[in-house]
Amino acid sequence: MTLLHDDSTSVLTTTDPRDGSPIASYPVASADDVRRTVDRAREAGTWWAGLSYSERRRVLIAFKAAIARDAKALAATIARETGKPEGDALLEVMLTLGHLDWAAKNAEPVLKRRKVKAGLVNYNQHATLGYVPYGVVGVIGPWNYPFYTPMGSISYALAAGNAVVFKPSELTPGTAVWVAERWREVCDRPVLQVVTGGRATGADLVRAGVDKVAFTGSTASAKKVMAACSETLTPLVAECGGKDALIVATDADLDAAADFIAFGALGNAGQTCVGVERVYVEQRVRDALVDKVVERAKRIVVTGDAPTYGPMTLATQADVVSTHVQDALARGGRAVFGGPESVADRTVSPIVLVDVPEDSDAVQRETFGPTVVINAVADLDEAVARANATEYGLGAAVFTKDAKKGERIAAQLRAGVVTINSVLGFAAIGALPFGGVKGSGFGRIHGADGLREFSVPKSIARQTRKAALNLLTLERSPKDMHMVERMIPMLHGKAR
Ligand code: NAD
């Protein structure tokens, strides 16, 4: 990707990471362009919010169908912009449409106004809770899953009745533009619009008067976005980086664990926010597990017509991988498969490291490449302590045949999503909210919480009759206050 400035306008040109060939050029939206887009969205959003749940659902399902009918074209666009194999891109499309479907069909049951209990003392109040849209949500997306990731915000924000202005990664604008074209086929109002550009355009979107920002990207960028949001007290959902740990107990199915480690750590060239970056295995099965992971890494093909995964989408990410591997080795870690030489320009072959000191970059910082650190631990308590000892808390996994033990470990892991005996098992489950803790961010996409994330709870208490005990007055009677004195210990005085 290059950002070029000519005399009249700024453009960004995307390139195919597989061979460096140019793909297409897109305008770099100026601050004024972004503001005008948000203004248009606000008007369209008022119309959209005024539709009934079933009317919105109909449009969203038509949107989904329009994408699904041309899924292969979308997958080809994703593959071209990211360099990932088309099969991976097609899976990304399928996963994403599952969430769009869930959001469209569950917005009404989750968000529609409902009666809530007012309580004995408030017997004269009819209390209801409803959820109203924010208005315009600004969505800022990354490049690693350029459809799945931002659509996690877009689908749920639209289903909750918001208009969306989406600023995709500067590496993957074509995917976003393709999706916006499908929207225009099913809806003639600009409820979903795309602005293309780099970081500055993202920063302009945050300051363009949007009512909420949904940011997905690195923790470092999220901090800048949050600082900008603080100027206007604009609420933010931040989906950031991760350093996911996977724990393997002695009683685990080691073949299954090795399969999932290979998939979770090396698939998509390791460019997965919830990818496996660290493995903590109980000492007794450590050698067997390492052998099995290496066996699988050996079968990975990174060149030719049908590679297991593609090159690094962001060229400079290969340097990060290289730096982390060299740091790990310099501090006493060992490479049992691959090594610094595996980083060949932007194509990185698998690297399996063991015995890497816990304070090294390869353990503490997001590597986002096809590498994995496997460290032995004395027991599962040590595994949990180490797993929790980074600034991140996005995903985590545990492998054991003992269901109770798995649930206990899952409860101890400080992460937003945990899988037992799989990795990424939550990704396709519409009902499960997704998001992190600590440096991995806050707020949730997906599930009922994802719908509520893009809604404002609005409470209404309707007085249905005059209260026998009239306390909401400036002229309370001594009789009523005497009653209050008696009621307090009656209602709240018992410690149970
Ligand atoms: P990035 O932070 O460089 O950029 C993400 C997006 O933010 C891009 O669209 C970029 O233009 C924009 N941006 C950057 N600085 C900005 C600013 N100051 N103001 C407004 N917008 C700004 O991240 P990336 O390299 O595109 O993506 C990789 C990162 O995303 C990794 O850390 C990965 O873990 C994370 N990620 C997280 C999730 C999740 O759901 N938690 C999902 C996918 C990726």
Image (cartoon, grey):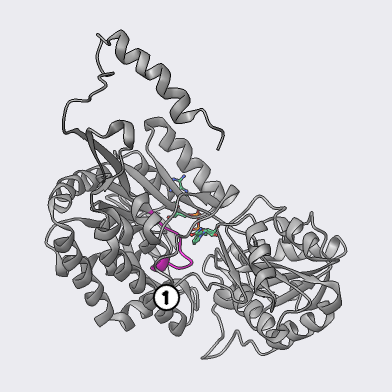
Using the image as rendered, state which of residue 53 and residue 7 is in the foreground.
Answer: 53
Q: Quadrant of the C terminus?
A: top right
Provide the major secondary structure of the magenta segment.
loop
User: Does residue 217 sit above or below 211 in this rendering?
Assistant: below
For the residue pair 347 and 9, the one nearer the viewer reads as 347
Label 1 SS: helix
Circle 1 packing at 10 Å, graded few (<14), some (14-19), many (20+), is many
Q: Answer whether residue 141 is magenta in the image.
A: yes
- List the residue tagged with mark 1: 92
Question: Which region is colored magenta?
Answer: 140-148
Expressed as whole percent of the image width and height from the top left, the position of residue 17 reads 49, 73
Point 81% across, 84% down: residue: 288
Q: Quadrant of residue 326?
A: bottom right
Q: Quadrant of the N terminus?
A: bottom left
x, y (%) of residue 321? 67, 65
Residue nearest the viewer, comparing 339 with 69: 69
